[in-house]
Amino acid sequence: MLISSVLILLLWFVMKTDALPNSSGVEKSTLEYEYNKYHPMSEIYAWIDQIVEENTGVVTSSVFGRTFEGRNMTYLKISVNPDGKQKKAIWMDCGIHAREWIAPAVCQWFVKEILRTFKTDKKLNKMVQNLDFYVMPVLNIDGYVFSWTNKTTRLWRKSRSAPPDDCDCYGVDLNRNFNFLWGTVGVSFNCCASTYPGSAAVSETESQALTKFLSNRTDEILGYFTIHSYSQKILLPYGHPNVSAPNYNELMKVGLAAAKAMKSVHGMEYEVGNSATILYPFSGNSQDWARLMGIPFSFTFELRDKGTFAFELPEDQIQPVCEEVYVGVYHIIKYIHDKTFHNAADSGAVLCSFMMWTIVMCSYITLTTLL
């Protein structure tokens, strides 16, 4: 009798012990992740793994490239796709400039909010049914890791690729390295400059990875969002002053409506316009290249603030920034979704217009290069 009682107690203890990791492990992870804090890259990698583990069948992760220093470039894909069919999609990347820590925080918040609300928000649920979401939390991983080294590296901007033979300075401004009018305006070919565009267009492993990924999905991706700081602006293509997007008026309309929605959250005003007009002229950026490749809705969000804290935005502003940006991005995605799935009859005319514009632009680029 005594032996039986002991065995029963031991069995009960084992069962309780085995249950503990499940109740304090998976449930604890991303539910208790501090979204109002800045996180080093090791914690962001761990967060990516946890998000996938906790959202089986909805979220996957894939490595689509490696950085100069050999780190995995991993994106998350949010997809409700029981039929396995190819869907239209949205792309968002953050942290192309290492010192802009608020940007990766926004990407993580965006993923969290989509997953938290898509089952109960009827409109969002419909958008998730029709669209896939690709999110790259940190694009410039090497630079971001370096910016966490100590106080002297906190404001590092570029990648960490090796310097050219005639220079001792590391890194390239990845947002000057894409293949659209590369190196023509808003850059410095002094390799120590913060806007050094590299030795050639798409010379960097990071920009090569993104270029390849998007190029293979130009018929799939409808919206491209790249998140930066600071200055509180929603930027439209193009950064080159002599080029305008063929759907500029539509982009302005959508951008202004998004800015209005963002202001309603915490009263913060975001200016909307062409990059060259309301910020400064610059070439070779990812937003312009994405628009040239045929992604119709391409936006850069420059987040808070207007210079008080600049790139060192305090952590107590992370949540309000994330809340207002989520509303703005949501508004644009909603517009893209409704136009795509309710105005399909117009697609032929849009395609024809885009093809004519692409021919003109390619001719312009060729002539510019030859001259």
Image (spheres, grey):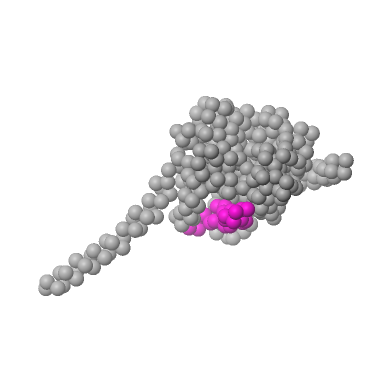
Pinpoint residue 91: horizontal percent, then vertical percent. 62, 47
- Closer-to-camera residue (13/163): 163
Residue 109 falls within the magenta-colored stretch = no
> Where is 2 relative to 19, above or below?
below
Q: Which of the 4 image quarters holds residue 232?
A: top right
Q: Is residue 23 left or right of residue 81?
A: left
Pinpoint residue 41: horizontal percent, then vertical percent. 51, 48
Q: Which residues are magenta?
A: 55-76
Location of the N terminus (image quadrant): bottom left
- Closer-to-camera residue (130/17): 17
User: Which residue is at a point 50% across and 52% down the rendered structure image?
Assistant: 45
Evaluate whether residue 288 shows in this view: no
User: Which residue is at a point 47% across and 49% down the rendered structure image?
Assistant: 43
Residue 68 falls within the magenta-colored stretch = yes
Pinpoint residue 136: horizontal percent, then vertical percent. 58, 48
Q: Is residue 359 left or right of residue 262?
A: right
Location of the C terminus (image quadrant): top right
